[in-house]
Amino acid sequence: MSAASAARRRVLRSASLPGALVVVLLATSAAPAAGPVAAISATATPAEMTIGSETSVSGTISEGAGPLAGAALALQSDGYPFGEYTTIARQASAPDGRFSFTGLRLDRNTRLRVVLESSPAVVSERVPVIVDPSVALSTRTLGPGRTRLSIRVGHTVNAGSTRTSVAWFVAARGTRLFHLADSTPMREIARGVSYASTIVDPPAAHFVYRACLNPGWEHAMGARAAHGRCPVTGYEVAANVR
Amino acid sequence: MSVDRIRRSAVAAMLLALAAAVSIASLPSPSPAFEYGGRARGIPVAAFPSAGAIAAARSYLDGRSGRTSFAVVDSKGRLDGTRLREHFETASVVKVMMLTAFLQMRSAQDRPVSSADNALLYPMIHISDNEAASAVFNIVGSDAVSRVARESGMSDYAPGVGWWAYTQTSAADQARFFFELDRLIPRRFYAYARGLMAGIEPSQSWGVPPVARPGWQVFFKTGALPSQGLFNEVARLERGGVTFTIAVFTDGDPSMAYGEQTIEGVASILLTHSP
């Protein structure tokens, strides 16, 4: 496909919008001057990851109908709270136009993009990657009426206060009502690692528990849907817990 | 052990759907948050005192003369008893509220309990000295005691008219207050307060302590207005990981010995009828 036809196609896709006639006229007059247009498609795999693991960004760069080989590409990153991209890796595209930036370790929600370092630069669509905290839970029966619950969370640093508390909820299996059993402080025991524990009176021999936290770094990690407030009392779920 | 990230938005949606289909009185639906869950095992213990013991204490109290009530907050935090909301004058049991208000004041000032402070607080609790209590009450003020009442969720509290001993209360309010003492008294002073309430002199240690000790740690305060036959006691009992509170209020007793016997009888039944 020639550059002129590509330009026409871009404009014709806009033809259903108001002012289409004006746009078509512009395309007709501009078409002879336009050169080949490069396009970059990029995706992250996985698009949601746990802190400490790796993701990769791969895709293709093409120019017109064919691949663009040997293009100087830069991977740029903009981590929460967002606002400035910085280049974190460079590579040249393969003969078939493919590229793959692998082994990417991100510590917070990040927007990535791939840039063709040319003049003018060509930029891919923004590639968001959600980074979740790593969580390890453990339990231990200490004796009648005493079960220790603990949580260790690996999280980002320098993205808000690490001082928070954990609300512990328990429910007997087969019931629907979670009771607030305790609220305990969470301590940062190492950089980027926080810990909290409690000893609860088990509601039954087999029970289910939940640990809820609203740390200062929560907006830097996880999906937006996980950024609500923890309940301050018990709550009821629709189905019996198993 | 399974570790599940709870998809609370989905849970909330399911709850809303259920609520639309079935009218249920439910707690607030969960909101999405960083929440993680798992399964666990444990050895549950029954609530102490047992429901049977509380029922037996209720029957016993109904057979006593005068106006009576009692409340228990059991080891699971549940309130039970009889005539829970009936109003009584606190007499000296209000001194624990004064103690709490005083220690909260010192905590807010970031000051320790001085020897001068102790010279008031110790006799106020240890021998139930009324002059010391009046001095403490004048220092903290009526509003501070009212604030303690609010913080502990009291619903039957009313400041005393003319004298702090005439403060209005109920068994339910006092049992809940003692159950919440570890939250209401600043942490830095909690051991001090426990020491006061566990070390009351023998002549003031009637009712619950003789029945419960030595098996239980007892933190308590008695109160009496002998001229009207009013004898009260509130106690927090701890043994191992089990904590519960008792509040017994009597009025119109024929004698102090009778009032003490009533409170002792309730405590004895609660302790001996529970497994």
Image: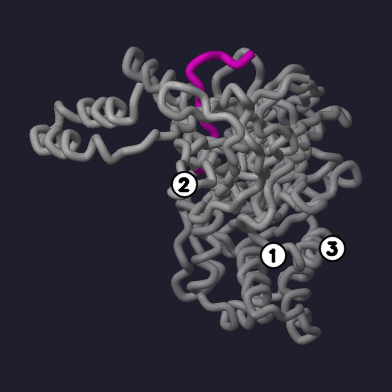
The residue pinned by badge 3 equals B199
Packing grade of label 3 (10 A; few <14, some 14-19, many >=20) is some
- Asked if marks 3 and 1 fall on the same chain, the answer is yes
Looking at the picture, tell me which residue is in the foreground, A74 or A151: A74
The vertical placement of B1 against B167, above or below, is above
The residue pinned by badge 2 equals A121
Q: Residue at x 50, y 25 (%)?
A: A236
Res B186 label: 1
- Asked if marks 2 and 1 fall on the same chain, the answer is no
Q: Amino acid at mark 3?
A: Gly
Compared across the picture, whether A181 is left or right of B41 comes to left
Res A106 quadrant in image: top right
In 3D space, how far apart are the residues under numbered discs 3 and 1 (Cα atoms)? 19 Å
Compared across the picture, whether B199 is left or right of B226 comes to right
Numbered disc 2: what chain? A
Looking at the picture, tell me which residue is in the foreground, B31 or B102: B31
Q: Residue at x 85, y 44 (%)?
A: B216
Packing grade of label 1 (10 A; few <14, some 14-19, many >=20) is some
- Asked if marks 2 and 3 fall on the same chain, the answer is no
Please tell me whether residue A240 belongs to the stretch shown in magenta.
yes
Q: Main secondary structure of the magenta part?
A: loop
In 3D space, how far apart are the residues under numbered discs 2 and 3 (Cα atoms)? 81 Å
Q: Check the image and name the residue furthest to the front.
A: A32
Front disc: 3 or 1:
1
Q: Earlier in the sequence, mark 3 or mark 1?
A: 1
Looking at the rendering, the stretch of residues picked out in magenta corresponds to: A229-242
Residue B58 in percent (x, y) is at: 61, 32
Residue A127 in percent (x, y) is at: 51, 35
